[in-house]
Image (spheres, grey):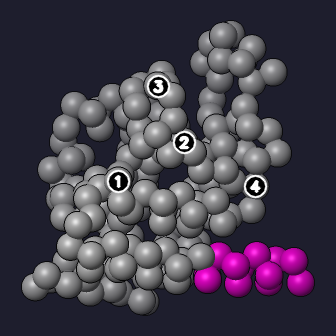
Amino acid sequence: MYNEIMQENTQSAITSYIEDVQTQYRSGQAKEHAYRPALKTLMSSFENALAVNDPKRSQHGNPDFVFLKKSNKGVILGYAEAKDIDISLDKTEKTDQMRRYAGYDNLFLTNYLDFRFYKNGNKYQTIIIGELKDGEIKFFSENFSHLESELKAFLEQSPETIKNGKRLAQIM
């Protein structure tokens, strides 16, 4: 029963996310940061995940989000880099910033419609839930459940690899 409730909450969180993105976009005033609350809420809807927008600088730079384990906030589940809704992620993937971020064990890149997942710098999945076309967002509802499953799997992957004693001390 609990798993069914959590799944229902996540599905409604994805629906809310889509509505929030659409509302922000239709305002005609939204830029990259306007969509961040929707992504933060979506990621925090998953069991035992805490999404932190604009976290402190970390080992490989300043990604826009860090995802922590709620039950042990010292454990990092992953990171996300978000770009504005009209930015091509194909170009972003080739930047110095993304080369630095390849050092993270678990990261996704998004423009809020296109989600690209990386493990140790290697892209393993792309899910597109919408596209901008003629000044409107066209959503692909057939990909919503796939995104939900992948985000859940992303957060359930093995936590970060501890590479030095200082980081181990921070967690403990």
Please name the residue that numbered disc 1 is placed on.
Answer: 33
Q: Which residues are magenta?
A: 1-12
- What residue is shown at x 35% (from left), y 87% (from top)? 140
Q: Secondary structure at mark 1?
A: helix
Numbered badge on residue 66? 2
Secondary structure, mark 2, is strand
58 falls in the magenta region: no
Whether residue 141 is visible here, answered yes or no, is yes
Which disc is residue 48 wearing? 4
Lower sequence index among marks 4 and 1? 1
Q: Nearer the viewer, residue 155 or 19?
A: 19
Q: Residues within 10 Å of mark 1 (few under 14, many from 20)?
A: few
Q: Residues within 10 Å of mark 4 (few under 14, many from 20)?
A: some
Q: Is residue 6 magenta?
A: yes
Q: Earlier in the sequence, mark 3 or mark 2?
A: 3
| Residue 138, horizontal then vertical, whole percent | 26, 86
Answer with left or right where residue 77 lies relative to residue 14.
right
The label on residue 57 is 3
